[in-house]
Image (cartoon, rainbow, N blue to C red):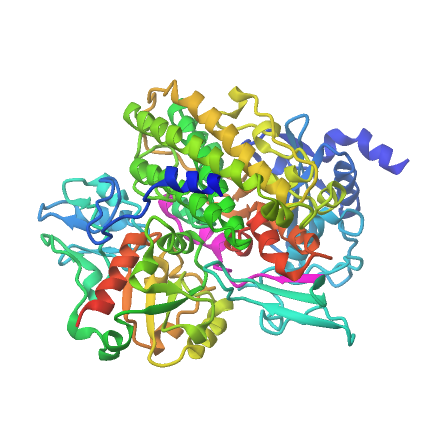
Amino acid sequence: MIDHLKILLHQGKQYIPDVTKAIISDTFRGRPVISNLQVDEQQLIDLCPTGAISNMPFSIDLGKCIFCGQCAFACPEKIKFSNDYKMATNDRNGLIIKEGEDQPILIHADLIRKEISTYFKGSLKLRQVCAGGDNSCELELNAASNVNFDMSRFGIEFVASPRHADGIVITGPVTKNMAASLKLCYEAIPEPKIIILAGTDAISGGMFTYSDAINRSFLDLYPIDLYIPGNPVHPLSFINGLLELIRKR
Amino acid sequence: MWLFRIYQNNMENFITLKNNQTIPLQDIPVLAYPEFLELNISFVKEDANHCVNYYGFPVLDTIKLICCIADDVKQKIYVSSSVIKKDRQEPITSFTARKLCFHLFERELHENFAIPYYDHPWLKPVRYPIDRPNQENTIANYPFYQIHSEELHEVGVGPIHAGIIEPGHFRFICNGEQILHLEIQLGYQHRGIENLFISSKKILQRNILAESIAGDNVVGHTTAFVQLWESLIGFRPDNKLVYERTLALELERLAMHTGDLSAVCTDIAYQLGGAVFGRLRTPIINFMQHWCGNRLSKGLIRVGESNFPFTMALANELTQVLDAYEPDFMEMYKEMKSLPTVLARLEKTGVITQKQAHRVGLVGMAARASGLSRDLRSSHPFGLYPGVLHEPVIKNHGDVSSRIQIRKEEIIQSIIYIREWLKNIPEQEKQPTVLPMPTANTFTISLVEGWRGEICHCAVTDLNGDILHYKIKDPSFHNWLAIALSVRNNEISDFPICNKSFNLSYSGHDL
């Protein structure tokens, strides 16, 4: 008992006091900022491994970007990945970052379904389904509940049964072999319910977009309430995205 | 007498390679199937040898089989091959009937190419790949093994589990609380990643695919890929690149082992251990984020170059991280191991005997916990390991407790290595250059000891030097059967800690 108290004392306070204002390392690749500089755009388009870069206007789609940062290394004057981890939005087009824009990515209050703030403002229980995720997003979602990020202080928790859940968090590109189970799990959640796509693989398929082993048809059936990019999604991106979603009216 | 003759003809029967060596494909001797079988069976009869990869790929109207046996004492890999006609109707003799360690390799061959075996004990589908010949077998209609009895009952778990983990189905047959049998069904994570290695033509794409094989073992798989690719194109990485990769590999081991200790504590409801080990992982992965912008090291390892050179400033920061980590870790570990309630859950739970480990061909940390000295860092050294004369940590009980102790001792070992390496950071010698194309018609093998165990990547190039076939083997491929065996006669409530003590990869297995 005494030893346990000693350990508690030595550990001290480990939680991040304010997760909405935490500053993380400069090297973290978060929301990119693209300058208006004229460069060989085609070279950057060809470089991108997932086809996230396009031109007219020159832009990066964070729903496709896997944050390898290779474009920023090739042309640092044009593209810089900032350490802004607040990348969640409920507007798929909001993930497209255009040149000359340096604005935070927003969650639009008018696009949030009314029942979300009515029912989930103080408490949100989520069922996570990994459908081809490589276990990186899964590790980070677990980390969101650890003593450092401590997501449950906001009433947001992962639960074991879909019957206890208010929504589903999907990671991975959705494999054919997992498609049926994903649908079953979603259908088992009582109404009203939300869908969150966590990580680039879930949002667009990422590196697996053109694989024959993927079946994303489930995602066409229902509205998506939140897109959280990342490879993997950072716990702070996840927590901040959820807080914005349930607290905004 | 016949066996003896094969030994005599050894020189022509197989080719001997070192780790990360590239050879012309035609240099691998092609044997008649019976001879191929006898040769490889005779290899694995030696305790020093084990099979690191056995797979096939289509060539015209045949399937070419390649078998790679690692000799852990002589630090060599024996590679031999054979061909079998596609759509062969007449069954062939299996390796598995003679040596169980081949069982999953042959199940995979059967699933991918419909190779018929007449004496394979269990041709259960492996992962239901998208291009399997038998499309009537689906992941949903698999008939699980059943025992009809009024005393027994079945428990089905998954594919979606209680926590945030990857999908897989576990079917238990229990007598009361006791597990008689566990059958594991995988394949839900199948993303067709081996095919993507062929169809994705950019080297950066392949590099990133390697990072996505198993997101908890990014450094391990990506190191295997870059070593393989650099060998294929004849590029010798400078000391700095080798240094960074090996350092990252040990940091990944440190972080994942710590996280696993946290998970086991959580599973036995020892909250303090769960919280403290969980938070001790954070500074390590945050250091990775500071080094390369990603907590799980994605983006760090690239073929022929590095975007994140390791600096003196990073070394100082890492030293501080380790200085803070060590006393906290030791304090927590010592406390945990002093609690009878914790030890009672860990000791003699989920036992894999040395004999079992040897039979099923266990690798990595799980093998070492059962008394098998399988560690590529000493047996097929790569990276900085030839310089450290690595001594594998071995435990002999093969229970959950042994797999916990191994993690703790490997953490200490990793910290010693890292501290030693931090004293001397090599200078960058080579500037990034345009990399050549791989040589045509070659075969390459790369072995890396990740935190989980043995990672093996093999590639074959075509006439134009492009990838003809890419084969990935995660250590989990060998080890999943061990989980099923370890839980027999244990209480079903002990399944979570047995599972967590192995912590195998679903995506690495399903590919």
* Residue B482 part of the magenta segment: no
Residue lying at the far right in this picture: please name it: B1
Residue range in magenta is B180-205
Tell me if I can see residue B236 in this picture: yes
Foreground pick, A193 / B87: A193
Query: Looking at the picture, does residue B309 appear above or below residue B50?
Result: above
Rendering quarter of residue B155: bottom right
Foreground pick, B493 / B475: B493
Query: Looking at the picture, does residue A176 appear above or below residue B26?
Result: below
Residue at (19, 50) in percent of width and height: A21
Q: Position of residue B215 (x, y in %)?
A: 44, 49
Residue at (79, 53) in percent of width and height: B93
* Residue B194 part of the magenta segment: yes
User: Where the N terminus of chain B falls, by quadrant?
Assistant: top right
Q: Position of residue B73 (x, y in %)?
A: 68, 27
User: Number of numbered discs present?
Assistant: 0
